[in-house]
């Protein structure tokens, strides 16, 4: 049985560097296979940082990774027995984008041998929670909302923006962070604190592709990242990205790229999808990005001012005519 840890909202807040305000972002999900005595301290450490999803076995942890956007899996050296090692190998090889970490909170006669077994299964990181900074290191590791796929996307897209304004860079940073759980421009605008009409107007007046196109394409970058996991099906990826159905995901792929979801998986790795995104939607608009400010909070939108002026003139004319 899968058990969510603390009943905290599955969101946390990310600081907007332009305004020092905060934006709502999904809380990192962490699947665990822990000794029951290790769960309560982890739940306390999770407050405001991440949401633990406790599993009774590695098989259940794999199910959690398949069905939910899990960033990290914690495996207790005291809870994994020899019968579960094959499952650990499947977890590590089948989901390369999910970090698998061994943790030790107490030592027994079998601890060292079990850690060696986990290493042989592909687990490359161990955290000793008995160490002086063990829990602090764990909180820092698990509280980072940036998944490996998100980090890879950011590492390619943000440098490609070249001399873009801080506002523009912050917008793309927020877009990359929020895209996996944000399906519409209206929802994106609400989470970054900008009116949807203002956001769309700023892109239109700068003669840039629409915010909808950028959001749709970044979501496909995440899909390409998810689908590199051999153990994830297209349906799994669709539900992980919060599409209503695999068919909805297929329609989305066809509308953006003109191909089927199966062809997308065969043709696009994360790297090729990134190259396509940067070449089509970033590089041609670098000169525009140098002056583009999509997140200038509190700055009146000239398009809205012009419309308000026209409306005022029409009303005044109507009153005068009457």
Image: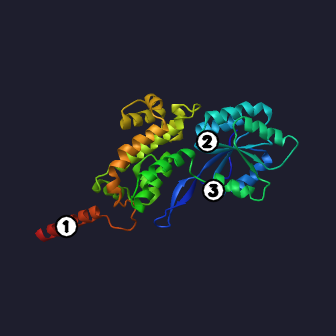
Residue 79 horizontal side relative to residue 255, left or right: right
Where residue 275 sits in the image (x, y, percent)?
42, 41
Q: Secondary structure at mark 2?
A: loop
Along the polypeptide, which appears first: circle 1 or circle 3?
A: 3
Q: Quadrant of residue 164?
A: bottom left
Residue 98, which numbered label? 2
Between the residue at mark 2 and the residue at mark 1, the CA separation in whole angstroms equals: 59 Å
**In front of the other: label 3 or label 2?**
2
Of the 4 image quadrants, the one containing the N terminus is: top right
Can residue 318 be seen?
A: yes
* Residue furthest left in the image: 321
Q: Quadrant of residue 220?
A: top left
Q: Residue at x 13, y 71 (%)?
A: 320
Residue 176 horizontal side relative to residue 108, left or right: left
Residue 315, which numbered label? 1
| Vertical order, 90 against 32 (above or below) | above
Q: Secondary structure at mark 1?
A: helix
Residue tagged 3: 49
Residue 44, which numbered label? none
Bin the neighbour count of mark 3 within 10 Å (Cα to Cα): few under 14, some 14-19, many 20 and up. Answer: many
Q: Secondary structure at mark 3?
A: loop
Q: Residue at x 41, y 29 (%)?
A: 260
Bin the neighbour count of mark 2 within 10 Å (Cα to Cα): few under 14, some 14-19, many 20 and up. Answer: many
Between the residue at mark 1 and the residue at mark 3, the CA separation in whole angstroms equals: 52 Å
Where residue 56 sits in the image (x, y, percent)?
74, 39
**In front of the other: label 1 or label 3?**
3
């Amino acid at each position: 049985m899968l058990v969510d840890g603390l009943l905290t909202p599955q969101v946390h807040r990310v600081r907007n560097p332009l305004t020092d305000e905060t934006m709502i972002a999904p809380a990192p999900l962490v699947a665990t296979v822990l000794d029951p005595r290790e769960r309560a301290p982890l739940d306390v450490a999770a407050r405001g940082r991440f949401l633990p999803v406790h599993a009774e076995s590695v098989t259940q942890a794999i199910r959690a990774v398949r069905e939910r956007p899990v960033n990290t899996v914690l495996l207790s050296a005291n809870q994994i027995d020899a019968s579960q090692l094959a499952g650990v190998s499947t977890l590590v090889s089948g989901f390369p984008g999910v970090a698998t970490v061994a943790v030790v909170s107490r030592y027994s006669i079998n601890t060292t041998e079990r850690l060696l077994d986990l290493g042989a299964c592909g687990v490359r990181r161990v955290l000793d929670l008995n160490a002086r900074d063990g829990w602090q290191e764990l909180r820092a590791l698990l509280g980072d909302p940036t998944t490996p796929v998100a980090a890879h996307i950011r590492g390619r897209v943000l440098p490609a923006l070249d001399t873009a304004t801080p506002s523009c860079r912050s917008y793309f940073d927020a877009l990359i962070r929020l895209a996996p759980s944000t399906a519409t421009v209206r929802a994106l605008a609400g989470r970054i604190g900008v009116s949807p009409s203002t956001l769309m107007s700023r892109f239109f007046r700068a003669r840039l592709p629409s915010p909808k196109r950028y959001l749709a394409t970044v979501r496909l970058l995440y899909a390409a990242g998810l689908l590199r996991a051999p153990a994830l099906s297209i349906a799994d990826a669709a539900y992980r990205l919060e599409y209503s159905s695999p068919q909805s995901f297929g329609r989305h792929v066809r509308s953006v790229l003109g191909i089927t979801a199966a062809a997308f998986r065969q043709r696009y790795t994360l790297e090729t999808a990134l190259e396509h995104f940067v070449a089509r939607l970033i590089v041609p608009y670098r000169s525009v990005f140098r002056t583009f400010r999509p997140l200038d909070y509190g700055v009146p939108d000239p398009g809205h001012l012009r419309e308000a002026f026209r409306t005022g003139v029409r009303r005044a004319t109507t009153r005068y005519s009457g």
